[in-house]
Image: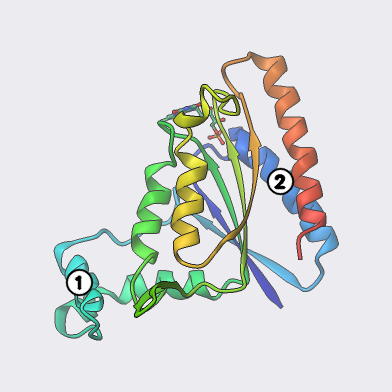
Amino acid sequence: MKKLLHIIATPRGDESRTLKVTRAFLDSFQSTHEGWVVEELNLFKEELPSLTVKRVDGKYILLGGKDLFGEAKDAWEEIIAEIDRFMSADAYLVSTPMWNFNIPYTLKHYIDIIVQPKYLFRYTAEGVEGLVKGKKMVVIASRGGEYSTEELRPFDFQEPYLRTIFGFVGLTDITFVVAQPMDAGGPDVQKQNIEEAQKRAREVAEGFN
Ligand SMILES: Cc1cc2nc3c(=O)[nH]c(=O)nc-3n(C[C@H](O)[C@H](O)[C@H](O)COP(=O)(O)O)c2cc1C
């Protein structure tokens, strides 16, 4: 069995536009991908470990090229559990709205937890090496506004940030499905854009390998 880890970064459940598009993706994915299981990680429901000083100390121990020891090692138990869950997946699906031109804080928190030296990346004589190799990610995003024009693209820190941080750990094969605008154009425009994004999400799911 292969595992698709579905990381949810909206608190809005059934009201979520992002998840409406995601459901289209998952319906197609599940009917065309026998042998895959989908594991859900809802970042608004699960409590992630906070980055206390002991946990941050652990990061500096690792950055110094040493293994974790003492209190920092004990404090890292929950972080290692999150890293293990992330690394156990064969592929990733991220459902995220745009919040303040970027990602919601829960997704940033998750990234701050899992992106760790020795586990997701390491420094070598040639530079940084990402350790998440040979895996793919699909990001399903929705935005209140529209960021595809030359004028407004610079306000989009969501897609460039996700490409940068996951690319840093080796995940460079990322496909975005974006529903926009969701709020700026009124209900008819929203409905049409959700349907268009759902169509593309189904295509991406069918072609996913
Ligand atoms: C806290 C917050 C911040 C937001 N910031 C932005 C933003 O910077 N740009 C934008 O286009 N939409 C913004 N929105 C609107 C959402 O991106 C949009 O409504 C999206 O479709 C919500 O997705 P969801 O229904 O899946 O939660 C924001 C919404 C919230 C709740």
Q: In the image, what residue occupies the spot 57% across and 40% down?
A: 13
Direction from residue 165 to residue 55 in the image, left or right: left
> Does the numbered disc 1 mark a residue whose Cβ is under 8 Å from ligand 1?
no
Numbered disc in front, either 1 or 2: 1
Of pointers 1 and 2, the one earlier in the residue sequence:
2
Colour option used: rainbow
Q: Mark 1 is on which residue type?
A: Tyr
Residue of label 2: 23
| Position of 15 relative to 206 (above/below) | above
Image coordinates for residue 129, horizontal then vertical, percent:
43, 74
Res 60 label: 1
Res 8 label: none
Q: Mark 2 is on which residue type?
A: Arg
Q: In the image, what residue occupies the spot 15% across and 63% down?
A: 53
| Position of 59 relative to 151 (above/below) | below
Looking at this rendering, what residue extends furthest in the right direction?
A: 32
Q: Residues within 10 Å of mark 2 (few under 14, many from 20)?
A: some
